[in-house]
Image (cartoon, grey):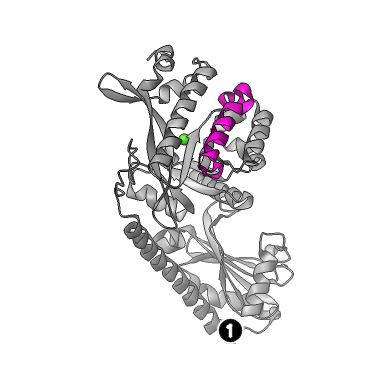
Amino acid sequence: MDPLEIVGNLHNTKPIYQPIISAIRHTVIGYEVLGRYRNGDEWVSLGDFFLDSEVPEEFKVEVDQHLLKMAIKDMLDTNTEGYLFINRNAKQLMVNDGEDLLQTLISFEQKGFSMSRIVIEVTEHDFDEEFENLNHLLLYYKTYGIQVAVDHVGAKSANIDRIRQLEPHILKIDTDIIRNHKSDGFQDIMHSLSMLARRIGAALLFENIEDNFQLHFAWKHGGRYYQGYYLAKPGFDLTAKRPLSVNVTEKVSEYIRREKRLVEERVNHVLAWEQKVKNAIPNWHGPKKIDTFIEALTAYFDEESFRMFICDSDGQQVSANFRKRGKEWEIEPDKKGSNWAFRPYFLENTMQMKTWNRGILSDIYSDIETREMIRTFSYPLTDQYFLFIDIQYSFLYDNESLLI
Ligand code: CA
C-alpha cells in the first residue's frame, strides 16, 4: 500500500483493540492499540506501514496521532476503564522532541483521561540508536505519569543493561520465543529476565499466547499480564463486552493443582532422604571415622546419587569424595581439604540447616565436573558437619517434580 495514500486518507484508518488480561483478577485491564486501514471491503493491518523504514517518520506520527485520538475518544465515549498500550518507535518519538504526543495526552487529560492510563511500548531494536535521547524523553514522559513498556524483550539479550537504565514499568515478552527456543538456553534467558524484572520492579507481560501450553508457561514464569489470540482476538468495538476465549480462572486452577502436586512430590523426596540419613545417624562416630560413615550410606542413595561428601561449617571438606563410576562407588581422598564456602548460598544454607535441623534441596544447576544438570541434597549431621548428596541427572529426569 502506498504510504501517501494512507496519510492522505486518515478517515480510512481506525484503531483496533487487543485485550490485555491480568493474572491477578483474570480480567481485561487494558488494550493494545493497533491500526487498520480500509482497503475496499476489508480492514487490513497497518503493521507493514509502521515497520517500513522507508516510510517517513512524520507520516507515522500523523497516522499514530490520529489513531490515538480516536482510541482515547472511544475509551471516554464508552466509559471503558483500564490502560491503553500504544506502540512508538524511537525515531518517531524524537520527531518534534516528542511534543505532539505529549500535547495530545495533556489535552485529553483535561477531558478526563488520565495520562497514567497510557503505556508507551518501545522496542529493544530502538536501543541501538539514540538511546540516550530516548531515555531522556521517556524519563520526561514518566514525570507525567505515563508508563513505559519494553516490547519484544529477549530478542537481543545484550540489552539487559539498557533495559535496567530505562526502568520500564512493563517488560513484554513475545511467547514466540518459546516456540523458537526449545532448549535449556531459553530457560536461562527467562530466568535472567525474571530476575531483572524483580530487580527493577517491572511487571512481565507475555504476548502472542496462542495455546494452553504457552498460557501455562506465562503463568509459571511470573507473568502478571497476558495477551494473545488464545485469550482474546483484537476487536474494533469496546462496548462489546466479549467474554474471553478461554476461562482463565479455570485454566489457572488447573495450573495450581498441577504445581501443588509437583511441590508435594518434591517435598516428599526431601522427607524420604532426610529419613534415610536420620536412620544412619547412629553410625556417626565423629570426624575421625567419617569415610566409613559415608561408605555405609552410599548403598541407601545408590539410585539417586553419584557423589557424596561432608563439609564443616566453614566450608572445608572433611571427608573424601565418594564418587560413583559405573556401578561402583570410588573413594577420592585427594578432595579432602577443598573449601566450598565460596559457592552461592553455602554459608546461608549451612546456617539454615543448623538452625532448623532440616535438610535442604538446592535448585537445579550444572555440575562443573560432569557438566550435567544436578541438584544437591544437604543435611546437618551435627552443628558442625554437613552431608552433601549430589543427585544425578538421570534420577531428576525420571522424577518430573525434581526437574523444576
Ligand atoms: Ca506491541
Q: Main secondary structure of the magenta part?
A: helix
Q: Which percent across, then down, holds residue 318?
A: 70, 71
Which class describes the residues within 10 Å of circle 1: few (<14), some (14-19), or many (20+)? some
* Mark 1 close to ligand 1, CB under 8 Å: no
**Nearest the camera: 191 or 134?**
134
> Residue visible at 35% across and 62% down?
253
Q: Decide whether residue 95 is among the magenta residues.
A: yes
**Nearest the camera: 393 or 149?**
149
Tell me which amino acid carries mark 1.
Ile
Q: Which percent across, then down, holds residue 141?
A: 62, 37
**Nearest the camera: 289 or 365?**
365
> Residue visible at 57% across and 45% down?
169
> Residue visible at 44% across and 67% down?
263
Can residue 183 be seen here?
A: no
Residue range of the region highlighted in magenta in the rendering: 90-117
Dot 1: what SS?
helix
Compared to residue 234, the image places residue 344 above or below, namely below
Residue sitting farthest toward the front: 111
Q: Which residue is mark 1?
A: 281
Position of the N terminus, as image quadrant, is top left
**Nearest the camera: 47 or 125?**
47
Compared to residue 144, the image places residue 57 above or below, namely above
